[in-house]
Amino acid sequence: MAEKKKSIFGQAIDALTDKDEKEAAAAKAAAEKAEADRVIASKAAAAKAAAAKAAAAKVPAAPKIPAAKPVAAKPVAAKPVAAKPAAAKPMAAKPMAAKPVAAKPAAAVQAAAAKAAAAQSAFAAKVAAPKKGVVTIRSLRIRKDHSTEAGVVGGLVEGNEVTIFEEWTDGKNIWVRIGPDQWSGMVHDGNTYIKYI
């Protein structure tokens, strides 16, 4: 009977100890969560302050305008003007032709718009309908731009067929675009490197 009471008593102590340990663990977890929340809030506040500081740094300061210096007034001497008798001339009334003010600028605007539309449609037609060409020399470089100074991105050999998307000239030499960032000389110093098929 004593052992049974002792074991019940031991069980009660164990239960109380478990309860205390669970409460302590819960309190510790709550404290750790509160600390983590505080750290996150602190970091968010620091980031917000840094963003506000960066935004304030981007706003240009108002330029300083120097104060205007007073200018001393100089006295102006009055010059006598000799009075000339005006001869009375009869004036014939000339009819004035009304000039259209808005018509000329409107016509100029319409002409400029028509010219731009024609250039755009010509460019679209040139891009929409690429032409074919064939290489006529033994070896031909493909460059990144229409210049002998531009980097080489490839090469062609005699007989290669190319699609010509665009032409560019400096008045003497002709370059053709055969792909994205791919240009090749068509005519250089009077020599033909690519001819149309």
Image (spheres, rainbow, N blue to C red):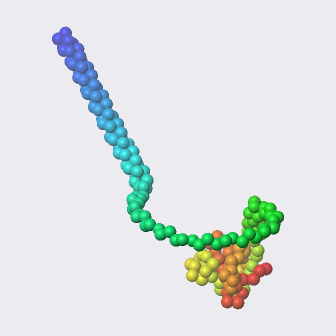
Q: Quadrant of residue 147?
A: bottom right
Going 32% across and 37% down the picture, which residue do you hit? 38
How far from the left and from the top, in percent, is residue 12?
Answer: 23, 16
Placement of 176 over or under 107, stated as above or below: below
Judge by depth and name the residue closer to the eye, 38 or 137: 38
- Placement of the N terminus among the 4 image quadrants: top left
Horizontal side, residue 49 vs residue 117: left or right:
left
Residue at the left extreme, as displayed: 2
Q: Quadrant of residue 32?
A: top left
Residue 120, can we see it? Answer: no
Residue 9, can we see it? Answer: yes
Placement of 67 over or under 50, stated as above or below: below
Judge by depth and name the residue closer to the eye, 110 or 23: 110
Q: Quadrant of residue 126?
A: bottom right
Judge by depth and name the residue closer to the eye, 106 or 22: 106
Residue at the bottom extreme, as displayed: 190
Going 68% across and 86% down the picture, which residue do you hit? 172
Judge by depth and name the residue closer to the eye, 44 or 53: 53
How far from the left and from the top, in percent, is residue 128?
Answer: 76, 67
- Placement of the C terminus among the 4 image quadrants: bottom right
Going 72% across and 71% down the picture, which residue do you hit? 87
How far from the left and from the top, in percent, is residue 193?
Answer: 70, 85
Number of numbered discs overlaid on the protein picture:
0
Placement of 36 over or under 180, stated as above or below: above
How far from the left and from the top, in percent, is residue 55?
Answer: 42, 51
Horizontal side, residue 85 vs residue 126: left or right:
left
Placement of 21 over or under 95, stated as above or below: above
